[in-house]
Amino acid sequence: MNLKLRVWRQKGPEDKGRMVTYEVTDISPDASFLEMLDVLNERLILEGDEPIAFDHDCREGICGMCGMMINGVAHGPERATTTCQLHMRHFKDGDSIDIEPWRAAAFPVIKDLVVNRGAFDEIIQAGGYITAPTGTAPDAHATPIPKADADAAFEAATCIGCGACVAACPNGSSMLFTAAKVAHLGLMPQGQPERSSRVISMIEAQDEAGFGGCTNAGECTTVCPKGIPLNLIGRLNADYIKAVSGR
Amino acid sequence: MAIESIGFMHWTNSDGVPTVKFVAVDTSAPAGKAARQKAGPGRPAGARKPAVGRSSARSTVVLKIIMAVSGIVLVGFLFAHMAGNLKIFVGQESFDHYAHWLREIGEPALPPVWALWIMRVGLLVSVIAHIVSAAVLTVRARKARPVRYAHRPKVQGSYAARTMRWGGVIVFLFIIWHLLDMTTGTVHPEFDPAKPYANVISAFAPERWYVTAFYVLAILAIGFHLRHGIFSAVRTLGQQSARGERIAKTIALVLSVILVAGFLSVPFAVLTGLVS
Ligand code: HEM
Ligand code: FES
């Protein structure tokens, strides 16, 4: 396949940055999107140019490191698919593809397509934990958990924190991420002691980091590689209302 | 930079050569927006102060709750208003009597027009609360995405959800015009406070087609606003099941259609001579 790419190039946090056009040729339709960028990068290195910086780690859709806006859609055109798991066969020969980093004040660009997602760590530090006695691990069946709750908690826990929800949100809000974490812990018996303080602290950290407010537009769920459902945001809101009204 | 621990890491690659020798953990500056923006990429991983108990009165979620509650008050008003308007189809007497009755509600417990003013104050407070929180959240949303995407396809989610702000502004301008037209009569050519029925007929006179056009535009804007707004409000107030989501969206659509049809039926009837 031959493609025309327009890629955001930015030397560093202070650089203004610009879209740069590249032609890539002879790409296998079986290559992943990141492998396609690898091919381009190897050529750039051989030509003495700076390779395009992008985040990645597992390349199997579970770590949440990769992620970029591909033709304006977070993680590209395939539903429930991370960029690393997106294959070139979903594009057509001769396509032109625009690639940009996540855009959010809370996610400043470090270089090219790499953004600093440390703001998510701040949200987690504010409440994404449980208090548990350390020492030997308790028996797995010591605390019975209804199957339905375990499944729902697991669904929320599949959030890999990639930041696509923020990137897609018209308000630059991280509500889906925060809601997934709040639901994941709040559905488990171990998460109950901090249930109220957690939701208040995490929302506060989210506001402080400079994310916008949710308008329930649902763009986040549409691009989420793990399909985290929008209704978890309602769950967060319910927890929040309970917490501030002191019940 | 306060370096807390320096450790020897023994990660090896396939050649058995350690790839990372030292790891330094910086425990100095607290994390946070300012630190992140100043420090850029290599930002410190300091622990955050526990935030519990600090004021959350202006949190985005609280502002959304204010919008949802005030929005629902306004929806309730719109339904009452629409029901009153439809009395125009019963006849002039019924409509004029209704308009007059509005001024007498609460009598004799309250002096005349008091109840009306209490409702007006309630509505004004709701409108102000709604618009102020909308404005604050809009500013925050703009700040949250300072750099726009070069390539952004058309709306992926709902069109109604994407037009809440501009739709709201149209509705707001319309409310002001509408009060000047039908309540104070300031911009109305033949206003007579004693003859509400006649005022409605002349307001939608064919020569004032632009007024009617604006009216129709505003009602459609309200329809779109509520198509998303009613669902959004329920979600903001804690609706959380997938089934409930479908029900809430259906109810939002049905209520919006009823409101749009009810409000548009009046100018339609006047223009087609059904009422005159
Ligand atoms: C007849 C008058 C109005 C009614 C009945 C109404 C109703 C609502 C409702 C029910 C919501 C949902 C609240 C939520 O998301 O939780 C809402 C949201 C909103 N309204 Fe209104 N509204 C009205 C007028 C206005 C005006 C005049 C403005 C702005 C000037 C406005 C701007 C907004 C905005 C920006 C949102 C947030 C959108 C979102 O959260 O998705 N509204 N409105
Ligand atoms: S690289 Fe791990 S999810 Fe894509």
Image: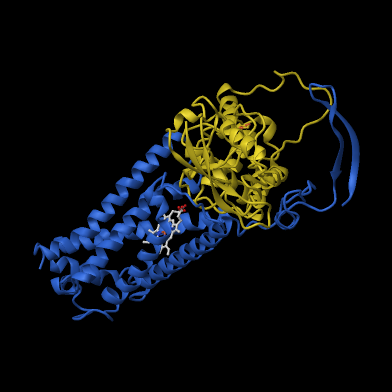
Chain colours: A yellow, B blue
Does residue B240 show up? no
Which quadrant of the picture is home to ligand 1? bottom left
Residue shown at the point (33%, 72%) measured from the top left: B108
Pick whichever, A72 or A143, lies toward us: A72
Q: Position of residue A113 (x, y in %)?
A: 61, 45
Q: Position of residue B232 (x, y in %)?
A: 44, 48
Q: Position of residue B102 (x, y in %)?
A: 29, 69
Q: Decide if residue A71 is on the left or right side of residue B265.
A: right
Q: Position of residue A101 (x, y in %)?
A: 58, 46
Does residue B48 show up? yes
Q: Where is residue B190, by image quadrant?
A: bottom left
Pick whichever, B19 or A200, lies toward us: B19
Residue shown at the point (29%, 79%) measured from the top left: B184
Q: Decide if residue A174 is on the left or right side of residue A127.
A: left
Question: Residue A190, relative to residue A141: is it above or below?
Answer: below
Question: Residue B180, relative to residue A154: is it above or below?
Answer: below
Question: Residue B144, relative to residue A32: is it above or below?
Answer: below
Residue shown at the point (40%, 61%) measured from the top left: B166
Pick whichever, B224 or B5, lies toward us: B5
How many tags in the picture?
0
Q: Decide if residue B271 is on the left or right side of residue B60.
A: left
Quadrant occupied by the C terminus of chain B: bottom left
Pick whichever, A35 or B265, lies toward us: A35
